Image (cartoon, rainbow, N blue to C red):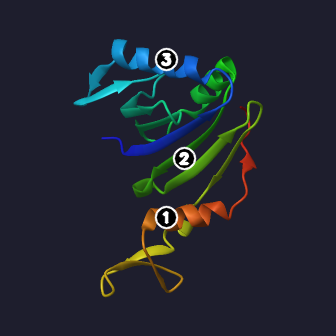
Amino acid sequence: MANMCSNHLFLKGGKIKDFFDEMQRIAIEQTTVEDGQFAFGIGEDPMFDVSIVQTNYIIYFATKWSPNIDDLVKIARLKEFQFELGSEELGNGIFTEYRFDGIELTERSLNSEELALVEWNDQKDAYMYNGEEVDCQTEQYEKMLAEKPYLAVADN
C-alpha cells in the first residue's frame, strides 16, 4: 500500500477562478473510488481527500507518494497562474515546498537527516530540537525549511 502524502496548494494570479471552477467540476463528475477512498486527478497520480477552499484559493489534498508536480506546472502554465505547494509525508522523509512563478519552478526541502533532528523525548513528553522543547514537530520543520533557499528544479 502506498504512503499518503499531505499537500496544500496556494494559487495566485491568472485565471484562478476558472481553475477552481474546473477543479470543482472534476470533483463532482469524475470522482471514482480507489482503495476505498474517493479519488480524482490528472495523469497517473490521482488526488485523494480533496478539500477546496475557494475564498483563499487553497486546495488541500492527499496523494499516493509525492504529488505530480509536472502536471501542476502544465496546468499553471495553461491557466496562467502561479502557485506554492507544500508537501509532506514524514514516514518517507518528505517535507518540501515548491514555488512556480509562471516561468520557473523552484523547491526547498528537508532531507531525512534534517527531519531526524526533531525527535520525541519520552521523559519530557515533548518534541526536542537542539536540546530545546518545541511545541509542534511540523511547526519546527516549517521554521527549518524557511531558513533554506529555493533552488531551481530542472526540466520544468
Mark 2 near mark 1, Cβ–Cβ under 8 Å?
no
Q: Name the amino acid type tagged 1.
A: Glu
Relative to residue 91, is residue 64 depicted above or below? above
Residue ID for mark 3: 21
Name the residue: 57% across, 38% down. Answer: 10
Residue 11 image offset from top left, x and y in percent:
60, 34
Q: Residues within 10 Å of mark 1 (few under 14, many from 20)?
A: few
Between circles 2 and 3, the one closer to the viewer is: 3
Q: Quadrant of residue 79?
A: top right
The mark that comes first in sequence, 2 or 1, is 2
Residue 85 image offset from top left, x and y in percent:
57, 42
Cα separation, mark 2 vs mark 3, equals: 22 Å
Q: Which mark is residue 86?
A: 2
Element type where label 2 sits in the image? strand
Q: Quadrant of residue 109?
A: bottom right
Q: Residue furthest front?
A: 55
The mark that comes first in sequence, 2 or 3, is 3
